[in-house]
Image: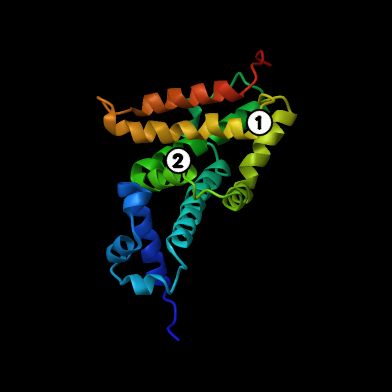
Amino acid sequence: MRHRDEHKQQALLEATLHEVAEHGFVVTSVARIARAAGMSPGTLYLYYRDKDDLLEATFSEVSRRIIEVALDAFEAEPDAQVSRVTSPAMSPAAWQLKSALCRVWHALVMLGRRQPSLFRFHDQFLHSSHMRDALKVANQERAAPLLEAFAQGQRTGILKQIDIALIEVFMFRSIYSLLQGSGCQVPAISDACFDQAFEMAWDAIALRHPAP
């Protein structure tokens, strides 16, 4: 019996990520993925049952990376990047939540600029027939600290009483559009525009309060 090689398994995930990001699900075949990973289709089937199994495994890996970056930023200490887009006139709890979300926003923007294929693959998969409820649940479990922060923000009157899914869409999904559209912008989307976009996202989910 042939033993599995973790390096080969990771190579298959990386090849799937880049092939789908560049060419889409339809064009990306098992043979194409195996070739990009430097191995035969037969070797691929030692690790994954079929193309669907490989796509789901790649989505799980991509989601893990994105959510890990988001959570690391959420739990980090405030920095100068955050201070220029947050207001000291807010209540301490609101300022803390906005600061944390701002860190997440900028961390995801930086990740998307460094590794655009992550976001292209993730976005394509989310809008495909491959997206199953079990995968959604797994992502929700990974992102539990962020989702709980949203819920706590609602309980304390910082965030609007809207579906948590809408908060996630307004706060983070716009990053996908901005990153993917940056290649079409003349000039390219600037850091200042991303700052403005964050403020717009925050205004969409936060309740307005008078200064304390």
Kindly identify which residue carries mark 1. Answer: 163
Furthest residue in direction top, as rendered: 210
Residue lying furthest right: 155
Residue type pointed to by label 1: Asp
Kindly check if marks 1 and 2 are in contact, taking CB atoms under 8 A apart as contact: no
- Which residue lies most toward the left here? 186
Q: Residue at x 66, y 38 (%)?
A: 149
Q: Position of residue 82 (x, y in %)?
A: 49, 31
The CA span between labels 1 and 2 is 22 Å
Q: Horizontal placement of 201 versus 38: left or right? A: right
Dot 1 or dot 2, earlier in sequence: 2
Q: Is residue 87 visible?
A: no
Query: In this picture, is 109 found above or below 26?
Result: above
Q: Residues within 10 Å of mark 2 (few under 14, many from 20)?
A: many
Q: Residue at 64% across / 45% down in the picture?
A: 145
Q: Position of residue 194 (x, y in %)?
A: 41, 28
Crowding around mark 1 (Cα neighbors within 10 Å: few <14, some 14 to 19, many 20+) is few
The kind of secondary structure element at disc 1 is loop
Task: Point out the frontmost of discs 1 and 2.
Answer: 1
**Residue 28, position in %: x, y?**
33, 54
The three-letter code of the residue at mark 2 reads Leu
Quadrant of image for the C terminus: top right
Disc 2 is placed on an element classified as helix
x%, y% of residue 187?
25, 25
Q: Is residue 147 left or right of residue 184?
A: right
Residue bearing mark 2: 108
Q: Is residue 151 above or below residue 57?
A: above
Residue 17 in sight in this render: yes
Q: Judge from the rendering whether residue 189 lies leftward or rightward of residue 93; answer left or right.
A: left
Residue name at image x 64 percent, y 40 percent = 147
Q: Which mark is residue 184?
A: none
Q: Quadrant of the N terminus?
A: bottom left
